[in-house]
Every structure is written in structure tokens, then in C-alpha cells.
Image (cartoon, coloured by chain):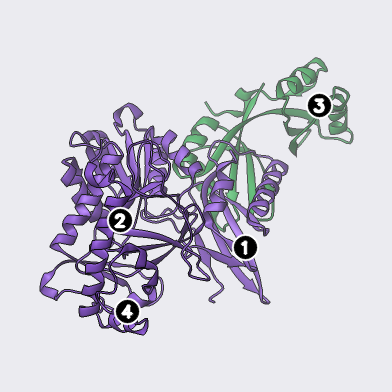
Chain colours: A purple, B green
Amino acid sequence: MIWNQNIECASREQMREIQSRRLAEMVKRVYETVPFYRSKLKERGIEPGDITSIDQLKHLPFTLKTDLRDNYPFGLFTVPQSEIVRLHASSGTTGKPTVVGYTRNDINMWSEVVARALTMAGITKNDIIQIAYGYGLFTGGLGLHYGAEKVGASVIPISGGNTKKQLQLMADFGSTVIACTPSYAAFLGESIIKEGIDPKKIKLHTGVFGAEPWTEEMRTQVQSILNIKAYDIYGLSEVIGPGVSMECEHQNGSHIFEDHFIPEIIDPVTLDVLPYGELGELVFTPVSKEAMPLLRYRTRDLTRLHAEKCACGRTLIRMEKCLGRSDDMLIIRGVNVFPSQVESVLLEITETSPHYQLIVTRENNLDSLEIKVEIDEQFWSDEVKVLEALKKRINHNISSVLGISATIRLVEPRSIERSEGKAKRVIDNRHI
Amino acid sequence: MIIKQLSIFLEDKSGRLTELTKILAENDINITALSIADAADYGIIRMVVGRPELAMKVLKEKSFSVQLTNVACLIVPNKPGGLYHALRILTDNNINIDYMYAFAINATASVVIRSASITDVIEILQKNKMELLKASQIYQV
């Protein structure tokens, strides 16, 4: 099923027409109402009215996360406070949080794109959806919530955490869809087994997972442990929240709702726009947002775009699964390391579980990487030589994938802290 | 003749072994033999106890990583050459021992033996008239 056939299957010409019209209008609006953008546009000699087509997008200035912080809290809003009906904020790891605002129309647009996304995963009004993303300042919970209501599904707004209650309601209410982070989904699956809940009581058939990068191996694992089909939903609060793009049943990349969020891929060094199919940094221009439209927001996510029509019939541009946010990327001894690479190595080894933590320290100006790995509850040997061989094998696979070696430390199952939201995969003690 | 040994994976953290023995004490489980194989950052505790199934259950409930491993408990005389005589037999029969630990009281010494071919170990030792502990001599009823 397709929620909005006209848009999701529009021809390239129709889509360009919508995008060009919205872009021209939006550039005018930010020029008139946001001093930050007015000065940036003036610097480049761009006057409102100069921009009439999507082809001119590449001439517009970029927006960085630091620009949002510099204009904290409401400096990038284009409407007066009286028009704002909702505020969300991301927990900044350093300094001030990133604030985003929504008008009533923005909330409606957000509900529309999430409704498209859920429909893409086959979710209908006949489903009971358990939303285990955090509700609150984080966009995950409320973002999914309004879209699910729009589809007409029965929403359980349970929020994150309280695993026992999650499992109880899942069984008693017969939830058919679970929406949460992939690491929490894996944790819920383990807990079903641990609590001895009869799997027949669990009626789940679909998972909508996002808010952190995850690998294909993790998808396979979560699908088998929960007996569901797992879909990737992508989003970031600066652009709207969850619902920027979504996978269809063919899972051949995520369809970007590009009538609202115009995507580009750029070379993060030269800042040049790259053609479809090339790996680079994903950039979005949320062109229809009223409260806080942004010009060419640099997501730091690394991926590729593809424009061919999908087997599902949609013509929307697709993005590949993100290799990782460059925020998550660690540079260790000059080598780029993504936690997701470690995860894919561990998922290929039966004797370990995909629960791990990277600890980076610096001694005498030399970086060292320690990886804590949980042994698998069932498949561990009580012989030291076998465990030492396992450590060696993990280290070998890790160093061939990452290009640097690590100290492997085997730890007990469930000893690495399970976040009920995003997994704490990295501890960087270098303070750089 | 197969004895169920408890194998427990422990991270190198202080108090973990005390916690483990406390749980066994509270559940009235007697420890007959114990050894620790320690690596740099973890250890493996191997124990022969009075109620292995119960021990496994209560330890799992407290989030310990526990396995039951099949071992044999051999009895040899507590005098020079006692152990050699028994091991000679196993070596002559091409048995590879993964690990073992022993303790001696008065006239005899007991040796806990682990091998991948544990049923062969038992068969060979019995054929050679070596004395083995029965599970009923260890397990609490």
C-alpha cells in the first residue's frame, strides 16, 4: 500500500516542480525573517527572487549543527513564538542542546510523512503499535505517535524503558508492531527468553527501528529473535525527526520524502555536490517547514543516493543504510573507526553476543582501543585455551576490518550496560 | 560415573567469588572440589558440588554464566606414583586431558578429569580396575 500515491510515485519532472516552487518560497522567507541566513545569502550575493529552481540549490550556503547552537534557542525560527506549537531538543553531548520548533502545519506534515513511512512497512489501522521510543524532548516517541494515529493504528504510548511492563503489555494487548531503537529491540528479544514468556503469546509481525545506526547482521538477528520483519526508519530532529526516509518491503534503501526534505550528497572536504551512487555526506534542505526551515543542513551521515524507480512503484530517491554518523566516528591512531564495523564482526562469531563497548584511551600520546565483548550465554567454553583462541580470532577479524588492532576483553553476559534508549557503545577517555 | 561439574565464567572483579559462594551457602549446596583457571582479565571457576542442577538454576537467576560439564572423579592412592599410574593408562589409550585438578585426604587422593571423550575415560579406567567416585557419593540427596 502507498499512503500518498501522487507524491510517492510522482515523475521526476513533477517532483522537481514541487521542490523548485517550495525552495524559491523558502529562500525568500528565511531571507526576510532570519538574520543569520540573510547575512549568509548576502555574502554570496543572493537576493530573494534569484532562486527559482532546484538546480540553484548548490549555490546556497550550508547549515551546520554548530549554527543551531550559535543561534540557541530560537534564533533560526522564521515565525513568532505564538505560531510555535511544539519544541523538541536533542541532548547535546557537549554544550547546549539543539532546539527545534514546529508550527501546527509542521506537526501535520510530520504526521503525514510518518504515516507514509508506516504504510510503507505494511502497517494499517488493523495494527496495534507499541511505541517504545522515548517520549519527551527526543523526537522519537511523539514523532511516531502522531503518524501512527494518522494511519489509524491503535497506539500504545509506553515510551522507553520498563522492560517488564513492555513485555506484559506486548503479550496482553497483542501488540503487532514495535517501534524502538534496534539495540532496545535486541534487548527486548533477549528479555522474552529470559523471562520465560511463551513466544506464542507475542503477536509482533513488524518492527520499526531507527535513531541509531545498525547493521544488516543486526537486522537478521533481531528478525529471528522476535520473529518479525524489521524496517529501518531514518530521521534527525534538525530536519523533522523520524520519518525523513523509510524502507519499503523490498528493503533496497530508504525512500526519502523529498517533496519535504530535498537530499544531496556532498564531498565533506571539497563540499562539492556528488552524483547519485557516490559515497559522501548527506545534506537535507527541509523545504516546506514553517517554523525552522534550514538551508542545506549537513547531517554528518555518510551514505549514497539512488534515483532509479523502486520495485514497489515509488519514484522517491533512495538512500543506502548510513555507514554511521561522522559524530559516531572515532579517529584512532589516524584511522576512522565506526562502532558499526565492530558490531558486524561480532555478529559473525557465534561465541559472542553483539553487545560490546569500545574504550579509547591515550597514553604517552598513543591511542589504544579496548573492546569489551560479552560472551554468549550458551556458547562459551570452560577452557582457557579455547577462550584465548576466541580472543585472538576476534582481534584478527577486528584488525582486518578496522585496520588497527585492539585489546579484546571478554566479559560476562549482560554486564555491559543496556541503555533503554541508545546504546552506549563508545567511551572515549582521551578528552581531545 | 559421569559427574556434573559447574563451570562459571567470572570477570576479574572483586567480590564476585564471595558472592558466588554466598549463593551456594544460602541454598545449602556443598562444594566438594574447586579450581580456578585464571587468565589476565577473567577466570573460570570449576566446581564439583552437592546439587549441580539446583546450583546452576540459582546462579543463573543471579546472572552468573554457568555451564554443566561432564567430568570423571578418579580415586588414586595418596602415595608416590599414584597419579602417574592412572594417567599412564589414559595416555596409552590416546586420551587427551583438557584439564584436571586434585585434592588428597588421608589415604586417598581424588582427581577431577575433563576430556572431550569423557565416556571413553570412564570406560578405560573401569576396565583397568581404577576406582571412580559415583555421583551418589557426591550429590546431596
Residue position for label 3: B95
State the residue in front, B65 or A38: A38
Distance from the alpha carbon under mark 4 to that under mark 1: 48 Å
Q: Amino acid at mark 1?
A: Leu
Disc nearer the start of the sequence (1/2): 2
Residue position for label 4: A46
Mark 2 — on which chain does it sit? A
Q: Quadrant of residue A289?
A: bottom left
Distance from the alpha carbon under mark 1 to that under mark 3: 41 Å
For the point 39% across and 39% down, which residue is it? A189
Tag in front: 3 or 2? 2
Q: Are marks 3 and 2 on the same chain?
A: no
State the residue in front, A299 or B73: A299
Residue position for label 1: A369
For the point 86% across and 27% down, which residue is it? B91
Q: Amino acid at mark 3?
A: Ile
Disc nearer the start of the sequence (4/1): 4
Q: Residues within 10 Å of mark 4 (few under 14, many from 20)?
A: some
Q: Are marks 2 and 4 on the same chain?
A: yes
Image side of residue A129 versus residue B113, left or right: left
Image side of residue A385 versus residue A1, left or right: right
Determine whether the residue tagged by mark 1 lies in a helix, strand or loop.
strand
Looking at this view, name the residue that lies furthest to the left: A82
Q: Height in image: A209 above or below B32?
A: below
